[in-house]
Image (spheres, helix red, strand yellow):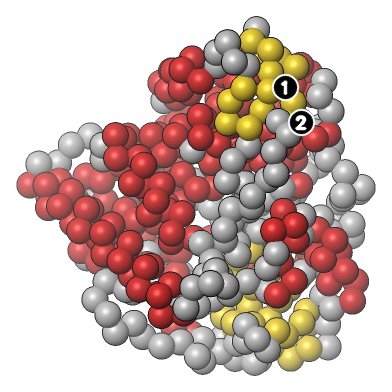
Amino acid sequence: MSSAGPQGLQAVPKELQDRESWLEPFEWYERMREEAPVRYDPERRTWDIFRYEDVKRVLDDDAVFSVNPREADDFVEPERPGEGLIFDTMLFQDPPRHDELRGVVDDWFQPRALADREPHFRELAGELLDDAVGADEQLDIVKDLAYPFPVTVIAELLGVPSSDRDRFKTWSDTLVEAASDDESVDAFADRQQQIQMEMAQYFLEMIEDRRENPQEDLLSVIVTAESSSGERLSQEEALGMCILLLVAGNITTSNLIANAVRCFAEVDADLFDELRGDDRALTSAIEEVLRYRSPVQAMSRVATEDVTMHGETIGAGDRIIAWLGSANRDERQFEAADAFRPDRSPNQHLGFGYGTHYCLGAPLARLEAKVGLSELLDRVENVQLAEAPLQPTRSSFIYGVESLPIRYDER
């Protein structure tokens, strides 16, 4: 992964480079939707798209807006071994190869397949919360639930030791983070490459083992299954799939759970009581979190041909960032878009993307959020955010906070 990232997402717009602006980017989004719904940023050499219908169009048209970074005019093929692993994942493949790769693992993430695992997920979340909820009546939602729960789930599905979850978190955080002002481009690139090499070595050993000794886990499916074209995944594709599932399988859900608690606490302290024991209401509220504070704020594409939007001509080979976080606050699509309405219906948000690349893990993320939050609500009441300054997740497209301490009364 280069310093600009395979999607160019490591480059943070100057408007979002300070702590407060990334914690609350929504006023900037609103201004852009009105004044410059399609704008070119010469510093990042990237087009930014802000309105709902435009973002939806970009995500839905695979022929004109490719996910493959190699389509970009300024793409430079990585020279260092292992640095381009992420390009072999379905995240950066257009149809039909995307569909073939996704088909290998798709069945594991269908709601019907996950339903059988829900009791075990509840057990995992419950154990974490039983350890965290205590007499001091304060816990950190990120450290005690939102981070360890989803990373344990995806580790178990893959068949890798969940005891390595601290290592997984370090890897995941590094791969999605943006370069800091006090770090050189080369130093950032070196650190990213080092992490990729560590992950590659880790999973290569697992892949070799599963080729010889298949088990009842997702890793065995990845290394033994044939795609719809009748071919097994190459070693690079299998490795990239493992890395993608591990990173995407915990980062998004971790921030969804933490963002949900933040939303509930900021909107109405009584909301926790209203949602307790009501699966339908909790499910609806989670959808509103996905709209209101989307864990993924941006997705990248590359134009494959010249295209005109709002009077601006985006050239073939130009990079594009589609701002999901802005689209989900577009007043043209959502009534009272800046209000958190836990019972909002309809709620056609783009929190998991749209079209061909709609998030594979969306059913798992929704289930984990419902399970984790309901187990939390069963144990605590009178929840309030603790008096502590929030630090945003250090990324230009993942949205959340590094820590979210709460105070509560034990039920």
Secondary structure found at label 2: helix
The circle on residue 383 is: 1
Q: Identify the image quadrant of residue 194.
A: bottom left
Q: Are marks 1 and 2 in contact (CB under 8 Å)?
A: yes
CA separation in Å, label 1 and label 2: 7 Å
Q: Residue beneath label 2, please?
A: 265
Task: Name the N-terminal-most of marks 1 and 2.
Answer: 2
Judge from the rendering whether residue 130 lies leftward or rightward of residue 241; answer left or right. Answer: right
Q: Residue at x 46, y 87 (%)?
A: 75
State the residue in front, 356 or 192. 192
Relative to 136, residue 285 above or below: below
- Quarter containing the N terminus: bottom left
Judge from the rendering whether residue 198 lies leftward or rightward of residue 391; answer left or right. Answer: left
Q: Residue at x 59, y 41 (%)?
A: 403
* Residue 10 locus on image (x, y percent): 54, 71
The amino acid type, in three-letter code, at marker 2 is Ala
Count the marks. Answer: 2
Within 10 angstroms of label 2, few (less than 14), some, or many (20 or more) residues? some
The amino acid type, in three-letter code, at marker 1 is Val
State the residue in front, 78 or 305. 78
Q: Does the rendering let one see residue 2?
A: no
The circle on residue 114 is: none
Secondary structure found at label 1: strand
* Residue 385 locus on image (x, y percent): 72, 31
Within 10 angstroms of label 1, few (less than 14), some, or many (20 or more) residues? many
Relative to 384, residue 327 above or below: below
Judge from the rendering whether residue 42 lies leftward or rightward of residue 160; answer left or right. Answer: right
Relative to 227, residue 316 above or below: below
